[in-house]
Image (cartoon, rainbow, N blue to C red):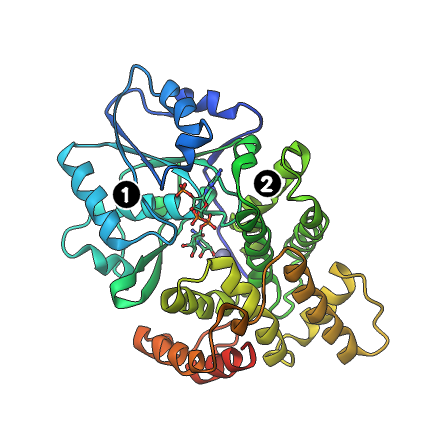
């Protein structure tokens, strides 16, 4: 196992009516800004529940953070929050709203062009934030990552800073009852791929991380078929906590990490606007095939422990594990080929050019995925 420092200080309030706990988590002094998305929280009653918790506080709001949050929208939030002297940010929504608010938090305290933050500039401070999660998928609620879009430049960039990790996360599984099937499927797939990005590399004898990762994947496989049941609390509660743990640092400490499926997938979102999880379901099966030699030992472990396959022939077990993974996404209702989204072979060179433009020249746990290899993966995914 590799050395690591582990510290995840996000306080989690989990369960039915946990939004009722919010006023205890919010600062008593200062000015709070509530930030949310396109209005789902107004329809499902979450806005009213949150507003009730804000009674007696000095607060303002900012709405309209879109899925795949836009830099231009977030810049308006930064301007408003600064002019209103906001001292605490409350994100209420899915990964896009939480990521967007993380950017706002860092940008409010950044001197200079705030795009630098997404260009690798170090974040040295941020306005404190907390969140109420409405879509289990990204893990953003307890992690330190943020992904921001700049669609006029076809860019999707991320940054990571301990300063933007939420102070608290309120996780009420009942708020997921209003989610459309598409977003529920996305949530299962995204969480599953998060685990694989931290697991499917090479063995370093990290027993806790491996078994924990395997159990999350098995849970998601079990939950998958039932996730669309409209008000099944047990399923939604388990989806929510599995998705949080899939990217809360715990399974990722002390192990090599990949993240190439995400890097290639982000370019597909930047180019074609595909949902984040959809891009992963398209890229991952082909990436597993391309990297099967480098990932051989872990692919076998994945085949055996997650899919319960007998290993009589190693290569055929790996083939079956890759096929089962793709079928799992398809059974969630996610199409796993680019042509099913009317995207043709020209995507390969476009993704290659995007990766070059972003300076992502070598990535993956071995540093051996290049823009040209990514183009081959995309070509095979049409
Ligand atoms: O905007 P509203 O009206 O709220 O509607 C949203 C949005 O249209 C809707 N929604 C959310 N909760 C709902 C709901 N509709 C009904 N009922 C509810 N309870 O769902 C739509 C999608 O929301 P979004 O936040 O975009 O989805 P998700 O949580 O999947 O987030 C995706 C974003 O997170 C980034 C992705 O790249 C993408 O930009 N990621 C962030 C990560 C991180 N911070 O660690 C890691 C991930 O790998 C990922 O890259
Ligand atoms: Zn993801």
Q: How crowded is mark 1: few (under 14 residues within 10 Å), some or many (20 or more)?
A: many
Q: Residues within 10 Å of mark 2 (few under 14, many from 20)?
A: some
Q: Label 1, on which residue?
A: 105
Secondary structure at numbered mark 2? helix
Which of the two labelled residues, at mark 2 and mark 1, occupies the earlier sequence position?
1
Q: Label 2, on which residue?
A: 241
- The quadrant in which residue 131 appears is top left
| Residue toward you, 42 or 25 | 42
Q: Is residue 124 above or below residue 306?
A: above
**Left or right of residue 382, residue 140 in this image:** left
**Left or right of residue 252, residue 39 in this image:** left
| Residue toward you, 206 or 289 | 289
Q: Residue at x 50, y 47 (%)?
A: 139
Residue 109 visible here: no
| Residue toward you, 293 or 355 | 355
Q: Quarter holding the C terminus?
A: bottom right
Marks 2/1: CA–CA distance: 25 Å
Q: Is residue 57 above or below residue 322?
A: above
Q: Quarter holding the N terminus?
A: bottom right
**Left or right of residue 278, residue 322 in this image:** right
| Residue toward you, 115 or 163 | 115
């Amino acid at each position: 196992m590799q050395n690591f420092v582990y510290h995840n200080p996000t306080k989690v309030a989990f369960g039915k009516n946990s939004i009722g706990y919010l006023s205890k988590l919010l600062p008593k002094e200062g000015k709070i800004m509530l930030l949310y998305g396109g209005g789902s929280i107004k329809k499902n009653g979450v806005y009213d529940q949150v507003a009730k918790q804000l009674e007696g506080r000095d607060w303002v709001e900012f709405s309209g953070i879109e899925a795949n949050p836009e830099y231009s929208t977030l810049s308006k939030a930064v301007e408003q929050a600064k002019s209103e002297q906001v001292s605490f940010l409350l994100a209420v929504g899915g990964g896009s709203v939480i990521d967007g608010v993380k950017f706002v938090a860092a940008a409010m305290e950044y001197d200079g062009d705030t795009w630098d933050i997404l260009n690798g500039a170090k974040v040295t401070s941020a306005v404190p934030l907390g969140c109420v999660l409405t879509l289990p998928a990204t893990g953003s609620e307890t992690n330190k990552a943020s992904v921001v879009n700049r669609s006029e430049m076809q860019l999707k960039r991320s940054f990571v800073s301990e300063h933007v990790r939420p102070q608290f996360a309120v996780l009420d599984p009942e708020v997921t009852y209003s989610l459309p099937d598409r977003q529920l499927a996305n949530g299962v797939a995204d969480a599953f791929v998060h685990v694989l990005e931290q697991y499917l590399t090479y063995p370093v004898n990290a027993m806790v991380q491996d078994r924990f990762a395997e159990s999350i994947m098995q849970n998601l496989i079990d939950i998958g078929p039932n996730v669309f049941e409209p008000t099944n609390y047990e399923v939604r509660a388990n989806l929510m906590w599995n998705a949080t743990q899939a990217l809360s640092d715990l399974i990722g400490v002390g192990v090599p990490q990949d993240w190439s499926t995400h890097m290639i997938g982000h370019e597909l979102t930047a180019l074609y606007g595909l949902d984040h999880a959809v891009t992963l379901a398209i890229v991952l099966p082909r990436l597993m095939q391309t990297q099967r030699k480098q990932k051989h030992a872990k692919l076998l472990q994945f085949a055996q422990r997650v899919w319960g396959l007998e290993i009589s022939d190693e290569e055929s077990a790996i083939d079956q594990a890759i096929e089962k993974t793709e079928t799992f996404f398809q059974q969630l209702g996610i199409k796993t080929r680019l042509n099913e989204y009317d995207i043709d072979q020209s995507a390969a060179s476009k993704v290659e050019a995007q990766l070059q433009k972003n300076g992502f020249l070598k990535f993956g746990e071995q540093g051996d995925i290049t823009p040209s290899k990514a183009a081959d993966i995309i070509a095979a995914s049409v």
